[in-house]
Amino acid sequence: EKPEIGLLGLGVMGKSLAVNMASKGVHVAVFNRHVEKLEVDIAKNFAAEYAGDFSFPWFDDLSSFVKSLSRPRNILLMVNAGKTVDIVIDGLLPFLEEEDLIIDGGNSHYKDTSRREKELLKKGILFLGAGISGGEEGAKKGPSIMPGGSKKAYDRAGKYLEMIAARDRKGDACCAYTGPEGSGHFIKMLHNGIEYGEMQLIAEFYHYFRFAYNFTPEKISAIFVDWNKEMRSYLLEISADILLKKEEEGFLIDKILDAAKQKGTGGWSTNAALELGVPFDTITAAVMARNISAIKEEREKAAWLYHNPSAEKKTQQQNFSDLFSAYKSASIINHAIGFSLLSAASKEYDWNLNLSEISRIWTNGCIIRSAFMEELIKIFREVPDENLLLHPKIVQRLKDYRGAHRLVAREAIEMGFPMPVLLAAQIYFLGYTSGQSSANMIQAQRDYFGAHTYERTDKPRGDFFHTEWKPEL
Ligand code: 6PG
């Protein structure tokens, strides 16, 4: 009997997904191109490595790989996002027939996915763009999967994705059809945006504890462990773990260079927010924090030139509960910001996204799983189209936290410590909760120098006015 799935691309994620699928009883054929330089046959070695447990038909030639599969074919691509995906699809096309189906499981840009889906549809080929989160371990034990594309494609191949996905509390798959076009990859991009925000928030609390409080990594780890009793956040959990890792005498964290890398998804979500006109403070701040971290040499020079005296003072031992409240407040706001972009994209592209269901598939397997994500399932059921910050439960919580959030933000500034996500969250919160903004002045300035016109508070919305601001010369 021929394999039901062909998996193309045996990188870390591809290998783990192949093993995951095989362990669920799916017959999987694997392909990896022969890498001349390495003189290793990746596909052959992989099949040999698992020969005791599973039988993976392996290929390094596309035509035989495609021909080996049962029809209509299901091919899962696990290759690097970008040009490679187009090259691989072009390579496959001559061997494919109508009704064959391709799933792109990489971190592709949603616009590329929408384009590919359209192009392939013209040729009668079905396409799904599936965001997959959870890293190597998730891929092996059960990731969170966000597949978008045609419903017909999902009805055919969704069962395989559901089979390998993580399970939520009720035992349902952390995988669900997200909507048409590039919606699955858009959602994955947003997952990563929220991920960037949460990572930076934890990083800046670590940094504050380490250098303003002079706490040992061990002590900070204990604080994070304590916080995580309530948060049950995967990212907080691994951060507590990281802080305990020792190398010889010292802690490994103290030896890791403070210059962050990124593959782009966080920045892509900021781009999408700019395109859709959505306020996106925390996630953008997290991307910028990575950018500024990357210019290490320049920072060192500036640190020497500007020598920040307050950064040497130690903080007053303040109430830890304020720090925890500030952390929780910023984290809620970061989630609200992320989901608000999903909402906006859903309206703009007519995707009809279900935010409650998206929260559900993010409760396990993915990087941003947490107790809060569990709560969001219900919250978004109650306010499916509204900003999270308008939900009565969240209003109550943020009112409780706001004093602490401001206090910690103020103290960090006074001490000379950058806490970009904590501050960005507070700025978003203040802006979002201001009935009267400063934009009347912006409108007046625009009208003054460019006759761009303005609306008035005493006239209906949509009526525009212009003023001759200066007497005729
Ligand atoms: C996930 C992660 C993953 C991401 C890496 C690296 O959900 O499993 O988001 O998909 O690609 O964590 O991302 P950066 O290099 O941009 O930090």
Image: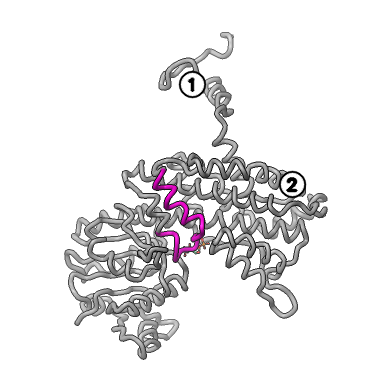
What x and y, as percent, mark residue 369?
Answer: 49, 61
Left or right: 430, with 270 as reference point: right
Left or right: 73, with 365 as reference point: left
Query: Would you say residue 373 sits in the magenta stretch?
Result: yes
Which circle's residue, 1 or 2, is located before the other in the chain? 2
Residue designated by label 2: 411
What x and y, as percent, mark residue 178?
Answer: 33, 55
Residue designated by label 1: 454
Q: Residues within 10 Å of mark 1 (few under 14, many from 20)?
A: many
Query: Would you say residue 127 sits in the magenta stretch?
Result: no
Q: Of discs 1 and 2, which sits in the foreground?
A: 2
Q: Which residues are magenta?
A: 361-382
What x and y, as percent, mark residue 30?
Answer: 32, 78
Colouring: one colour
Q: Residue furthest top?
A: 472
Q: Quadrant of the C terminus?
A: top right
**Looking at mark 1, is its residue's CB closer than 8 Å to ligand 1?**
no
Give the CA distance from mark 1 to mark 2.
39 Å
Residue 209, labelled with which disc?
none
What x and y, as percent, mark residue 85?
Answer: 35, 64
Q: Nearer the viewer, residue 294 or 327?
A: 327
Q: Residue furthest bottom?
A: 52
| Residue at the image position 55 percent from the left and 62 percent from the top | 232
Type of the residue with mark 1: Tyr
Q: Nearer the viewer, residue 35 or 437?
A: 437
The picture quadrant where one finds residue 27 is: bottom left
Q: Is residue 230 above or below residue 459?
A: below
| Residue at the image position 75 percent from the left and 78 percent from the top | 249
Left or right: 82, with 291 as reference point: left
Q: Residues within 10 Å of mark 2 (few under 14, many from 20)?
A: few
Element class at badge 2: helix
Q: Are marks 1 and 2 in contact (CB under 8 Å)?
A: no
